[in-house]
Image: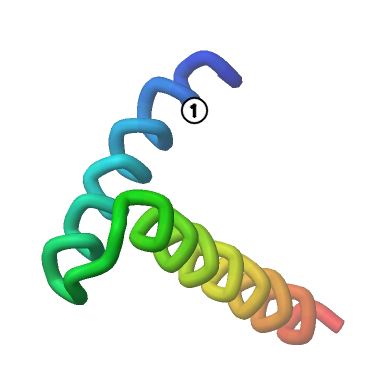
Amino acid sequence: MALGAMMFSMPTAMLGAFYFSMLRDLGAGEGFALYAMIGAISLMIATLVNGLSKG
């Protein structure tokens, strides 16, 4: 299961970082950091919303 997650998430992260690099004229590292930050924030929001609805 972990291997499948890696096979899906790594190319998605690389394409997302490339997209942000081209969209905002950022370097590769900056684009990846921006993509990772957006992903982390969305994960926290989804966790909070799902956790609060069950409480």
Residue occupying image coordinates x 59% and y 65% = 40
Q: Is residue 12 left or right of residue 52?
A: left
**Residue 34 at x, y percent in the picture:** 43, 67
* Residue type highlighted by circle 1: Ala
Residue occupying image coordinates x 59% and y 20% = 2
Q: Nearer the viewer, residue 54 or 6?
A: 6
Q: Is residue 17 left or right of residue 24?
A: right
Q: Provide the secondary structure element on which disc 1 rests.
A: helix
Residue occupying image coordinates x 13% and y 63% = 22
**Residue 43 at x, y percent in the picture:** 59, 66
Residue at the farthest left position? 22
**Residue 30 at x, y percent in the picture:** 40, 61
Q: Is residue 55 left or right of residue 8?
A: right
Q: Is residue 32 left or right of residue 43?
A: left
**Please, is residue 4 above or below residue 20 in the view?**
above
> Crowding at label 1, few (<14), some or many (≥20) Cα neighbours within 10 Å?
few
**Please, is residue 49 above or below residue 22 in the view?**
below
Say which quadrant the C terminus sits in: bottom right
Residue position for label 1:
5
**Please, is residue 31 above or below residue 12 in the view?**
below
**Residue 52 at x, y percent in the picture:** 78, 85
**Please, is residue 7 above or below residue 28 in the view?**
above
Say which quadrant the N terminus sits in: top right
On the image, which quarter does residue 44 sit in? bottom right
Q: Nearer the viewer, residue 45 or 39?
A: 39
